Amino acid sequence: KQGKYDEAKPLYERSLKILEKALGPNHPQVATGLNNLAGLLEDQGKYDEAKPLYERAIEIGEKTLGPNHPHVATGLNNLAGLLEEQGKYDEAKPLFERAI
């Protein structure tokens, strides 16, 4: 990691807008873009900004791919990791368990 968050964020946001416009707001690729942006925000400690993006990615995945799809498990794991980083172990545990 190079830590160039200020350079990366607008690129992630632009990519997400392109995906939403080209594929629609509920496409699985949009969920991937949301996960990527959320991960960047999480790396910067911007947990309150990252959490709703992870949640939206999970919601899209569940609706389009089904609740047991590997991409949904990835989203659950990402959100659980975010909560774990904040010491919210009781919230993270069921998400980790659901992801496996």
Image (cartoon, rainbow, N blue to C red):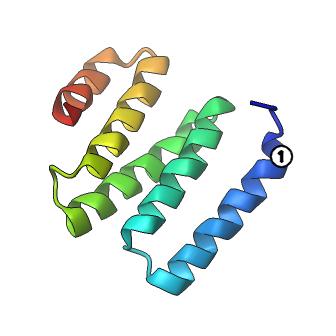
The N terminus, quarter of image: top right
Query: In the shown orientation, is residue 53 left or right of residue 73?
Result: right
Pinpoint residue 40: horizontal percent, then vertical percent. Answer: 64, 41
- In this view, 97 is above or below 23: above
Vertical placement of residue 28 versus 37, above or below: below
* Residue drawn at x 61%, y 74% as measured from the top left: 17
Residue 36 located left or right of residue 94: right
Q: How many marks?
A: 1
Q: Position of residue 69 (x, y in %)?
A: 21, 52
Residue closest to the eye, 6 or 1: 1
Q: Position of residue 20 (x, y in %)?
A: 52, 77
Q: Position of residue 75 (x, y in %)?
A: 36, 44
Instruction: Judge whether 100 appears above or below 5 on screen.
Output: above
Categorize mark 1 by other alpha carbons within 10 Å: few (<14), some (14-19), many (20+). few
Residue 77 occupies quadrant: top left
Q: Is residue 92 left or right of residue 40?
A: left
Judged left or right of residue 78, residue 33 is: right
Residue occupying the point 56% across, 34% down = 47
Q: Label 1 amino acid?
A: Asp
Residue that badge 1 annotates = 6
Q: Going 29% across and 59% down the picture, which residue do you hit?
A: 61
Element at badge 1?
A: helix
Residue at 25% x, 32% y: name it: 95
